[in-house]
Image (cartoon, rainbow, N blue to C red):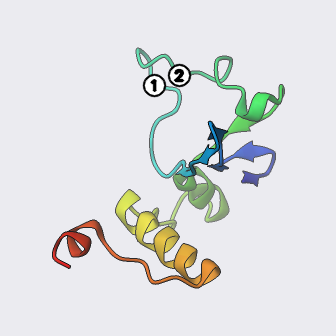
């Protein structure tokens, strides 16, 4: 998922030995260029496409509101929306892990 030529999220569906798995990643509010963490713009090449960068939901919110008034949701809030939308798109009832154990 791209915003202004910068990657903000990804969906992956790898397969191996006739088994598929899936995953999703959303860059919400982590400092991608933090010193000492091994991240910087030259190391991260999103989807192997040179000349493209990465961004965060927090940065997009700040840019689109002029740096003020933009409220970035928490990772937990984003996760709840992603799970709800996944259920709606695929027509399934989503159940929290704690609820599965009690069934």
* Relative to 40, residue 92 above or below: below
What label does residue 34 carry, if any? 1
Q: Nearer the viewer, residue 4 or 94?
A: 94
For mark 2, give the secondary structure. loop
Q: What element carries label 1?
A: loop
Q: Are marks 1 and 2 in contact (CB under 8 Å)?
A: yes
Q: Residue at x 26, y 72 (%)?
A: 100
Q: Nearer the viewer, residue 38 or 99?
A: 99
Instruction: Write down the quadrant of residue 85 in the picture.
Output: bottom right
Mark 1 and mark 2: Cα distance apart in space = 6 Å
Quadrant placement of the N terminus: bottom right
Which image quadrant: the C terminus?
bottom left
53 shown above or below 91: above
Q: What residue appears at the point 72 percent right and 26 percent down from the top-left corner?
A: 45
- Residue placed under numbered mark 2 in the picture: 39
Q: Tell me: residue 44, above or below residue 77.
A: above
């Amino acid at each position: 998922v791209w915003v202004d030529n910068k990657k903000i999220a990804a969906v992956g569906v790898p397969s191996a030995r006739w088994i598929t798995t899936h995953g999703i990643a959303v860059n919400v509010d982590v400092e991608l260029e933090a010193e000492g963490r091994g991240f910087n713009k030259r190391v991260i090449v999103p989807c192997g496409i040179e000349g493209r960068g990465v961004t965060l939901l927090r940065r997009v919110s700040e840019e689109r509101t002029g740096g003020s008034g933009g409220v970035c949701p928490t990772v937990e809030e984003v996760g709840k929306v992603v799970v709800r939308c996944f259920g709606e798109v695929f027509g399934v009832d989503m159940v929290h892990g704690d609820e599965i154990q009690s069934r």
